[in-house]
Image (cartoon, rainbow, N blue to C red):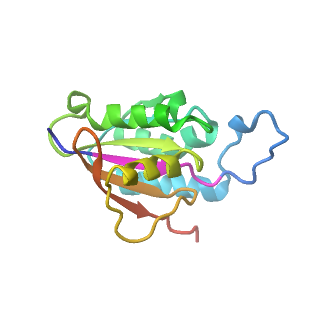
Amino acid sequence: MPTVTVYLVRHASAGVRNDADPHDDDRPLDPDGLLQAAQLADWLRHEPVRRIVTSPFLRCRQTVEPLAAALGLTVEVDGRLAESTRVDDSWGLLAELAGTPGANGSGGAAVVLCSHGDVIPDLVRRAQGRGMLVPGKSGCAKGSVWILQHWDGEAFATGVYTPVRPPA
């Protein structure tokens, strides 16, 4: 089975949540978030990314759009990455993409998934529960990335947390 790396991205900084606002899904990135999105694109444009899939929320789409533009890819929107999604649903998408070599090109390909601070920790816990080794620190800061590698059809062997550099 070809190796597929999954970059699990938490959306970049988007200001302060207003729980009273029914349109929070339309909250855009703030200036720091725009810088984080550019930094993400500068980093991952050098990786063999074949697909970019994101939550439908604006802040997630804006986080990965610079990367998609740099790679000439179309951003795919999938509700299984939206806030408050059941872990079984988001895990199903993650497993589907990690195990789809035909969609990822030959050997060493990667996919990028962009989601939220309530979805990503659930996915990481599920992966750890299935035996994924996490050397070093864990977290889920805005703009951070989890690099999940060595999918065997059921689990990832390793997951590495990469916090984003703070804006200057």
Residue 111 horizontal/vertical position (percent)? 34, 41
Magenta-span inclusion, residue 14: no
Residue 142 horizontal/vertical position (percent)? 58, 57
44 left or right of 103?
A: right
87 left or right of 156?
A: right
Residue occupying image coordinates x 34% and y 68%:
135
Magenta-span inclusion, residue 8: yes
Magenta stretch secondary structure, dominant: strand
For the residue pair 130 and 89, the one nearer the viewer reads as 130
90 left or right of 131?
A: right
Q: Quadrant of residue 109?
A: top left
Q: Quadrant of residue 24?
A: top right
Q: Is residue 146 above or below residue 136?
A: above
Q: Quadrant of the N terminus?
A: top left
For the residue pair 121 and 116, the one nearer the viewer reads as 121
Residue 148 horizontal/vertical position (percent)? 33, 52
Q: Is residue 10 above or below residue 56?
A: below
Residue occupying image coordinates x 80% and y 33%:
22
Q: Which residues are magenta?
A: 5-13
